[in-house]
Every structure is written in structure tokens, then in C-alpha cells.
Amino acid sequence: MTRRTPVVFAGHGNPMHALSDNAYTRALARLGREIGKPAAVVCVSAHWLTEGTRATAMEKPRTIHDFYGFPAELGSIEYPAPGSPAVAALAREALGGAVELDEGDWGLDHGAWAVLRHMYPRADVPVVQVSLDIARPGAHHLALGQKLAVLRERGILILGSGNVVHNLGEMVWSGRAEPHAWNAEFDAFVKARTEAGDAAALAGDPRTMPGGALSVPTPDHWYPYLYALGAADGDPVRWEYEGLENASISMRCASFGL
């Protein structure tokens, strides 16, 4: 790839999307085809929370089924993408060295593989996951995303996987559920600030933002969006998918630099 690799944020939502053929999963597949095969993917997922920052550095990361109560078919999915100790080392260098390399404890959780199996179904792109230091504030994660931007020059795709709005306690298990007003409010606020290039407005406490108190009751699914914003390095956004599901989830997906 001769151009700077784009950045992607994927709202991953219900794990069952990993098995689905719908407008959302087709948008991911189309995006993968348009971007083409990158040299590697560095993924920041909502599902790897740590003290400090870690990066997977094994040759063959395992597929982690970090959910329960779903059909056996979902739990049997394997996404055998290779890892890359070399890319993990590059990520560590980009982040200033204060990153612990994980050579066996973690792998690829469903925040990574449930998205990537639609974008790169052959599982032939090396994947490195970077964890979320969950105790740190939004500005910290935005800054780390900015540091990861240098990897784009090496053909590496930066992927944030979470949800702009994620409140499981307020979910309605119906495909026809109307979104809560606060869901639509916060989702629209994030869209507007992103289109304005105002990443700083999103780096504060989301609970103080319009609709944010209920949209982001915990920051785990929100922080990956800040990594994508930081890695975007000012590139314009393109919305790959927009939708509010189960009343309290935003499936918004974005690319930057396409």
C-alpha cells in the first residue's frame, strides 16, 4: 500500500452480528474490500481491560469467546489470524515503550474477531491487540491513539472496536425497539463533533456531554472511539454505518482517511 492506511472504528454490538448477514455486516465487508489487505491490524477492543497498557505479541493468538448465553455456533467460531511480535514491538515503540508485551495470556477477543471476520474473512492479516488501561481518562486514550498514527505509514490499519453508545442495563431485546432519547442525543453529538474535527470536545468526561450520562455508564466501549479519533490525525471522517439498536446501543462505524 502506497498511501497512508485508513483508520476504522467499528461499533460491534451484539456478538450475534458475527454470524449475521445484514446491512451492518455487509458494510464491514465492503469496507474491507475498499481498504484492501493491510500489512497488519492493530486493534483496540472494548473487551481487554488492564492496569497499564499491553499488546499481544504471540505468533498465533487464540480466539477468545468472551461471552455467554449465546448459541453454540457462535462459541465454536475460530478466527485463526496470525499475530505479529514485530508489529507488537512497533506499537510499543510508537506508544513510548511503556507497554507490556503479552506473549500468551490474551489473544483475539470478540471485539476484534467479530468485526475482522467480516472485513477480512480469510483471516490472513496479522492482528495485534492493544489493551485499554481502564483507570485512565479519555484524554489519555486520545493521546495514545495519536501516537499510534505513525503506524499508518507502515501500512498498518488501526481499528477501534467498541460502541459510541453502550448501556446494557437499558437494552430492549426487540429488533423494533425505539432508541432512548439519550441514545440518539449522544450519538448525534458525537457525529457532529467528529465532523467538525473537534476531537478535544470528546476527550473529556462523556457523562457531562449531551445524553452521555446514560449513553456511557462505563467507558470501556467508548474509549476505542477515542483511539480511532487520535489515530485519524485530522483526516476527515466517513460514516460507514449508522444505526441505533436495542434502544441503548449505537452501531455507528467510521473510517478516517479513505
Image: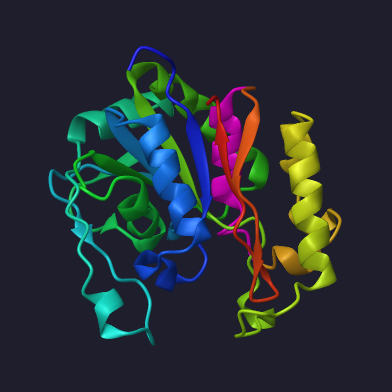
Across and down, in percent, residue 67 comes to: 38, 76
45 in relation to 65, above or below: above
- On the image, the x and y values in percent for residue 23 come to 52, 58
Q: 144 left or right of 81? A: right
Task: Please indicate whether residue 125 sits to the left or right of residue 94 in the image.
Answer: left
Q: Is residue 36 left or right of residue 30?
A: left
Residue nearer the viewer, 244 or 59: 244
**133 or 112, nearer to the observer:** 112
150 above or below 6? Answer: above
On whether residue 222 falls in the magenta region, the answer is yes
Q: Residue at x 74, y 28 (%)?
A: 197
Q: Give the image location of residue 234, x and y in percent.
A: 64, 22
Residue ID at (43%, 67%): 17
Quarter occupied by the N terminus: top left
Give whichever of 163, 32 is nearer the camera: 32
Above or below, 94 against 134 in this view is: above
Q: Magenta segment, principal secondary structure? A: helix
Residue plotted at (74% across, 44% down): 191
Direction left: furthest residue = 59
Q: How far across and how far down the image is residue 38, in percent?
A: 31, 29
Residue 50 visible somewhere in the drawing: no
Q: Quadrant of residue 110?
A: bottom left
Q: Range of the magenta residues?
A: 218-233
Displayed quadrant of residue 106: bottom left
Q: What is the tally of numbered marks visible in this picture?
A: 0
Q: Residue drawn 76% across and 65% down?
A: 183
Q: Is residue 248 left or right of residue 253?
A: right
